Image (tube, helix red, strand yellow):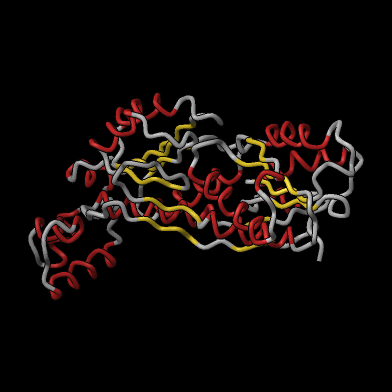
Amino acid sequence: MMSRGPATLRDVAGHAGVAISTVSAYINQTRPITPELAVRIRDAIRELDFVPNAQARNLRMRRAASIGLIVPELSNPFFAFIAEGIEDRISREQMTLTLSQTGPTGAREDFYAELLPRARVDGIIVVSNTGKTPMSIMRLIERFPVVLADEYMPGIRVPFVGSDNRRGARTVGELALSSGRRRAAVITGPEGLWSAEARLAGYREALASYSFAESDVPIVRGDYTFDSGVRAATSLFIGTPATNSPDVLLAANDLMALGAMRVIRQAGLRIPEDVVVVGFDDIPAADMMHPSLTTVSQSAFAIGQTAADLLLRTIAGEDLGDERIELPTTVVRRSTTID
């Protein structure tokens, strides 16, 4: 006998005893189907091992089966985990991810906001690295479902998911300061970036709870990169007598904390005996370094999954407005703080 080809929509309709249009409505969820017919169609699909043609279905529904992601860079493991969380969620819907990297300073954010719509996507997730709301993003929101992840942009009405940065920074800051040190310094993130300002606010709350005068605490700006942590720590530790340099360092992310740790060791200081150091993000390298870094764990993967879920709901027609989700954080205590 000649082998029969894959089952078709017509085969399923004949097996279930219904019209082809009814099977199509069941698969595409374009109109209600009675429970009895739904069971018959479902059983027919299983018995015939029918696989819907996703491409044809998306064309009929005028969907691209793809979403876009604008992200600073994947060399930062945190952003890579966000992308993985997004891909994990949308793959269940047989959708693909179109990725655009704007660079560590967000220099290409406008470029990709203008370019991505030409890639034929159903919606876009934006992870900003500027803290600004450019006109290109505003135009994007007018044309596509958009969700913000990790970084909030003021003045726009779209869903957002991130972490409770302020609470996490305060908690890890209080842990570092509980060692009794009195010469604190902060390496914070880029000015105007929502996460950086929230973490700085949390560190300031921790410092205030231990009666530090803000004027006595050096605050050095970084850009969330390892190199900026090196530069910031160089200004704090190199050429400064050990008796005057900071003995507790609060960094706004792990990459900057790790860069600072390199400089602290070069200055001949021990961690944590001479300098207590904490970070934020809990990237894999935080646990691989010696000494291992005490930090705040936030699930970048969960942020990506949640952002994708919000976008899929928006694409499906839900009006989520400016729904805002801040996922909880936890402190991971390791070797750069004192028990």
Residue visible at 56% across and 31% down in the picture: 104
In the rendered image, the quadrant that contains the N terminus is bottom left
58 displayed left or right of 278: left
Is residue 195 depicted above or below 120 in this figure? below
Q: Can the viewer see residue 338 in this picture?
A: yes
Which quadrant of the rendered structure holds the C terminus? bottom right
Give the image location of residue 168, x and y in percent: 58, 58
| Residue 142 in the figure: left or right of residue 149 | left
For this orientation, the residue located farthest to the right is 268
**Residue 265 found in image quarter:** top right
Q: Where's residue 267, x and y in %?
A: 88, 37
Residue depicted at 27% across the width and 67% down the height: 47
Q: Residue at x 55, y 48 (%)?
A: 81
Q: Nearer the viewer, residue 56 or 66?
A: 66
> Taking the image as drawn, is residue 2 in sight?
no
Closest to the observer: 9 or 300? Answer: 300
Q: Nearer the viewer, residue 294 or 220?
A: 220
- Looking at the image, which is closer to me, 176 or 208? 208
What's the residue at 81%, 39% (across, down)?
A: 262
Instruction: Give the tally of numbered discs.
Output: 0
Would residue 197 be found to the left or right of residue 55 on screen? Answer: right
**Residue 282, position as x, y percentages in the image:** 65, 53
Q: Is residue 281 left or right of residue 38?
A: right
| Image coords of residue 95 (percent x, y) | 36, 47
